[in-house]
Image: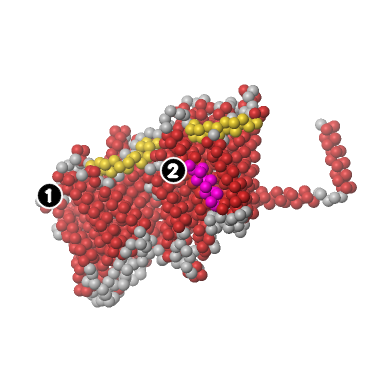
Amino acid sequence: MILFWLILFPTVGGVLAWIAGARDPDAPRWVAIAVLTLELLVALPLIGAALAPGHGAWIAQFDHSWIPQLGISFELDLDGLSLVLILLTIVLSLVCVVISWTEITDRSGLFHANLLWTTAGVIGVFLALDLFLFFFFWELMLVPMYFIIALWGHENRSYAAIKFFLFTQGSGLLMLVSILVLVFIHQRATGDLTFDYLALLGTKMSPTTGFLLMLGFFIAFAVKLPAVPFHTWLPDAHTEAPTAGSVLLAGILLKTGAYGLIRFVVPLFPAAAHAFAPVAMALAVAGILYGALLAFGQNDLKRLVAYSSVSHMGFVLLGVFAWSTLALQGVVVQMLAHGISTGALFVLVGALQERIHTRDMRRMGGLWGMVPRLSACGMFFAIASLGLPGLGNFIGEFLILLGSFQASVVFTVIATFGLVAAAAYSLLLVQRAFHGAPQEPAHHRAIADLSPPHLAVMAVLVVAIVGLGLYPQPVVDEVAPGLAAVQHSAAVSAALPEHVAERAP
Amino acid sequence: MQHFLWLVPALPLLGSIVLMLGAGRLSHRAEALTGVLSVGLAAVIAFAIAGAFLLHPPPGAAYQQALWRWFAVGRFSFGITLRVDPLSLLMMLVTSGVGFLIHLFSTEFMEGEDGYGRFFAYLNLFVAAMLLLVMADNFLALYAGWEGVGLCSYLLIGFWWRDPANGLAARKAFIVTRVGDTAFLIGLLLIASRLGTLNIAGAMREAAHTWHVGAPAATLIAFLLLGGAVGKSAQLPLQTWLPDAMAGPTPVSALIHAATMVTAGVYLIARTHVLFLLAPAAEITVGIVGAATLLLAGFSALAQNDIKRILAYSTMSQIGYMFLALGVGAWRAAMFHFMTHAFFKALLFLSAGAVTMRLHHEQDIYRMGGLARRLPAAFWSFLIGSAALAALPLITSGFYSKEAILSGAWADGNGGRVLWLAGVIGAFVTGIYIFRAVFIAFFGEEHTPVSGAYGWRVVMPLVVLSALSLVGGFIELPPAFGHVTLLSRLLAPVLPPTREVTDMTPLLLASAASILGIALAAALYWRPSRSPAETPLWRFWHGAAGFDALYDRLLVRPVIWAARIDRDDFIDRVYDGVAWGTQALHRAIRRTQTGNVRLYAASLAIGSVGLIAIAVLR
């Protein structure tokens, strides 16, 4: 039941926020904070439950019949993997509320309603284990996000919002087709019409069919991740979205793609995924390097950060298709670290834009002298993003590289060049925005440094990324059973001996 | 004593955190005290640990302290564990001790600078990272220190951030060394997957068990580690960042060149000497890289007029000697030279800083002149440092350590003799370039007026380092001079012995080379002339043989060009094409919707006829 609440609270909270917005523009903010805090209080005890011995990978479950005629049920299951991603979602949503306090003044009720509904949709994606329900949430989280970009975005917002919608919607359709075909194949084989993920695991099909169905899922998730060459919606959406939108997109929505790959693509179609792995890893490596090259060339600060996400998500894709315990653990840490560090960078870019009304780095420079705290935070997260040991991103990248090294030496070695590239664009960001001489004398006038709420947000994120870098073990332990379970089901459905799927050296 | 190991890196780290969080709230005095005391205390503890270590050598010749389990996944477990064996002990003492003196010097040198606290925050972090590097018991923690050192070099080289040139130098240092770091990281991945552990001692044991001499895996790993080492230690072909690194304040150069950073590569190779012994091809490459770098840097130093650049090239050259020593298996000699070099190079940089701080930051030696009378403290310090660098026989520490290296190379058979010759030529060149700087800057006419005065915080480090530069070599004397072997005995549990040479020939030849070099410098520059003519040869060496220009053309510009032309992402143009095509199709089909009923009827009829025809004729 607790899982149902996790979805219900933000859904209802969104409605409340909308209503509250009619009376007082600040009321929705407090509603959102209250709802998300409640959400956090509900979710936090689950951490302890996960670490308690004596249960399998699943920590909590909720199953309610929905459309029994079609074998669709409202089935929610939570394992450690879902849990850490849900916690990240809640925390980043709270961050979004705080940093939108001064930025979003127009229709704040509707804004916070959309924000909470996005949260609800994302949490639903991380929980749903009925494929129909999963697809339902997958589409659901898209709509409020579309409105956030289209209504509160920057100059080119409607282009960006439509592009975002078309990419994700189009690829989502491919997934729907795959889901339906998979369900019918399963029905033909067993006579049982069901969308239940656990029942569909291990469905037998011809290699070609399996490959095509796998591709349907893969493209949907690869668009969301995003993987090259499906990444082009991302810079536009991230750049045009309001700060909270960028944080949600980069911090959370991208992770649904990675989650889908881990939860569905490989376990449902292990043989096809195995055959496809070289292609996926090649795309991953291409993403790492091409994303970095694009980030390096940008003048728009926000676009730079957006493209750096493409590069970082390349590591995630690499790790997923390496499919070893090390690599998958790395993927989880990388997702969390990327959510925190990139989220923080977007918050800072947003704060900067609020102050100097531009994102163009050709018009920045020398900000260290004017806003030292903001600049120091920017430098810190730029350094986190280039993978400095001691900060979370390094653990993720190192584990992914160590795990993929067993699977493919060539791709892993090429991927390491991404570390040099990340240094190049991250330090260029620091140089062009914060160091050097101010490019526009007009900006010499006093601009305010980070406000106390922003500083508090930064402090939380700094502590989180340092904690993840110095002591990631709790996260590793939390997700270990869940990852072991997906690896196990992939190995079973592939009907391969486990060590083959594990790919020990 | 081993329970206190953690304090050695933790105190400077704590100091750094306090300084960062207290930015803008602490007084200069408090900032200086935090910065100096944290490193000073760490140094005191380090010396106490060393004392206990020497009095009661621990079992296994190492102190060990497990701090916490960093992370454990699958069959790998990484701990933050400190391990101090004699090799680490030596590095730890030099880093914290010399680091402390540099900190003390900086409190006066940086007086009145914007960002005083920030400077000490970075400086403290630098020392902490280096201490982690030398005290880590596993490769991953070592790598963390390794990257931390790189970060701090970036922060400090670009300390004066208002000038974009400094930012460029800082990024260059970070990115060039990161190329090496990446090779190192790939090496670590190989070690982990082949040997199943990243614990240094464990991996070395396992390597010695698993591989025979010349095994491809061992060779590959050794080359990858060498890649990391040449980056951090500024050796060919990744040496280009070091001369530019002098963009930072002078004490930073002292720290980078003497106590931290550039010696990391030497430490790494000494630490993994087991692997290099299994990979003779890699080991001889280390020696060749060292020899080539020491000559290249020595000649380049001859063609510089900036006092800090001369010193920067001299560092490259001296690290080249250490690599040469590692390459011929003179492991202990390499560490000996590391130690003496730390003394005299810190001394040279600090005395150069002491000069420039009184000359309005003038760094061109041709615009100095006559400083011997005006700045006696700086002069004597610089002179002692130069004598040690040039390996002036008998009375300087540099002589004994360089002698140990050269006799090691001499004893290494035929291949070693070639390297030995390079080393002797290098010694000759060293004498010329450093005494050229001495004569031009400190003698002759005055070109820039001197201002200000020194406090004790400048003088004291100079005095201590001068003393160490002179007598620091006496802990290890060749057989001909009493045969003291304190350092060798200390390092005996870690590093294999160097072949002993009783033949006096190499010693005499090397001594002659350095004296000749100094004499030639005296002959040429005793009466300093104008700055040198810009001959093509001079320009070639001034630009350090054109590596910068080469990399710029080959790597930097193509990447920037590619990033620029692809700023708008050509893949997105494909989707634009799809969108445009869809719209074009839409417009084309819309044309048919004319509202003309006759046209509709006609097309309906034609279509029906066509369909029927197909059905019938098929």
Side of B518 where A460 appears, left or right: right
Where are the magenta residues, as a range?
A: A29-41
Q: In which quarter of the image is residue B539?
A: bottom left
Examine the rendered structure and indicate whether residue B257 appears above or below residue A489: below
The residue under the point 45% across, 46% down is: A337
Using the rendered image of the protein, determine whether residue B518 is visible from the camera's viewpoint: no
Relative to B363, is B504 on the left or the right?
A: left
Residue A373 counted in the magenta span = no
Which residue is drawn at the image coordinates 21% and 53% (left, top)? B44
Q: Residues within 10 Å of mark 2 (few under 14, many from 20)?
A: many
The image shows residue B490, relative to residue B516, as above or below, that is above
Of the numbered discs in the image, which one, if any, rests on residue B483?
1
- Foreground of the two, B411 or B321: B321
Q: Residue furthest left?
A: B482
The residue at which mark 2 appears reads as A396
- Residue A40: x and y in percent read 49, 43
- Element under disc 2: helix
**Cα–Cα gap, marks 1 and 2:** 52 Å
User: A427 above or below A138?
Assistant: below
x then y, percent, for residue B497:
20, 43
Image spot of residue A348 (x, y percent): 49, 56
Q: Is residue B257 left or right of residue A19?
A: left
Disc 2 chain ID: A
Residue type at mark 1 is: His
